Amino acid sequence: MAIEVVASDGRRLAVEDSGNPDGYPIVLLHGTPGSRFGPSPRAGVLYRLGIRLISFDRPGYGHSERRPDRTVSDVASDVEAIAAALGLGRFGVVGRSGGAPHALACAALLPHRITRAAALVGLAPPGAEGLHWFDGMHESNIVEYGVARTGRIAVAARLTVAAEQIRADPFSKVLGLREQVPESDRKVVADDGIRRMLVRNFAEGLRESADGWVDDVVALTSAWGFDPADITVPTLLWHGEDDVFSPAGHTSWLGSRIPGALVRIQPDAAHFGALDVLPEVLLWLRSAEAPDPG
């Protein structure tokens, strides 16, 4: 179900409310680039899991209005506005890829609302002490994040062209991913249902402009606005060992900083392995009795 929510500063946010309406509420933060239609379990699966899954277009993506100069931490106020509009009390939060740092921001800044948090195949903050940030990263991401560190104008010039190409043929983006990833990810992306979800995700996120993508990349490579060490809610960090988009060393670094974090580095899995493990992660977020994923 599509919903429009007004943020605290008057911006419009496009929200998708799916799964079991009486289930446990969990907010899903999509990847970069992405949208509220990012890959997730189908509605029937969510219903059986007892999960009410809430996702939304981050500012500048899809139908959500842009928030200029946003930081990773700014997502917390948008999530709180969505929770208030939907009448949520406390809830879980999970983010995948570029959404993972945003999920951690919610955990750090909304401990009164967040019960548990999960970050899948995420990034560490820029300047993470002791971490060689680009080690093991695919050249395309090294260039993208490297350019972002020179300022928004440079990254906008690069990603505007890429977004135009994706709008013209979103399926080409999915095919391009297959050429960049290890075998374990190729098997995931080869699934027809996953491909359709990815195509819809990219097409919706970049439907009008590259603004959300540009702002995400700049935010991820700038000061996040919170310290992961301040997270106090139970947190699960999952990563595929062979990930080339956001190397597993980033999750290891975060695991050493977040008090009590559960860290799962899975062999023979990579970036899109997060899609396979997501149902188990949702169960962990829902219930303390659920087994630890991985």
Image (cartoon, rainbow, N blue to C red):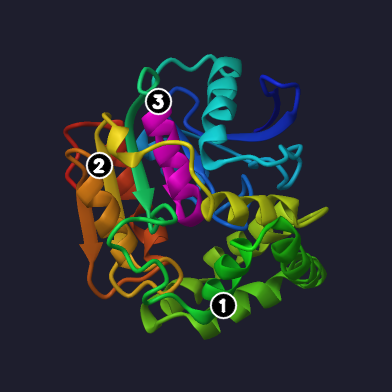
In the picture of the structure, the residue carrying the numbered disc 3 is 91
Quadrant that contains the C terminus: bottom left
Taking the image as drawn, is residue 151 in sight? yes
Q: In this view, does 92 lie to the left or right of 15?
A: left
Query: Which of the pair 213/151 is nearer the observer?
Result: 151
Q: Where is residue 114 in the image (x, y as percent from the top left)?
A: 37, 26
Q: What residue type is labelled 2?
A: Ile
Q: Nearer the viewer, residue 229 or 56?
A: 229
Which segment did they paint magenta?
93-110
Looking at the image, can residue 18 be seen?
Answer: no
| Magenta span includes 103 | yes
| Magenta-drawn stretch contains 277 | no
In what quadrant of the picture does the N terminus appear?
top right
* SS label for mark 3: strand
The residue pinned by badge 1 equals 140
The residue singled out by tag 2 in the image is: 258
In the image, what residue occupies the spot 52% across and 81% down?
A: 139
Q: Where does the image place residue 103, in percent across and percent down from the top left?
A: 44, 40
Image position of 218 (left or right of 43): right
Based on the displayed image, in which of its 4 quarters is residue 275 positioned? Answer: bottom left
* Secondary structure type for disc 2: loop
Looking at numbered disc 3 in the image, what kind of residue is underneath it? Answer: Phe
* In this picture, residue 259 sits left or right of residue 36: left
> Which mark is first along the chain, 3 or 1?
3
Q: Is mark 1 on a helix, strand or loop?
A: helix
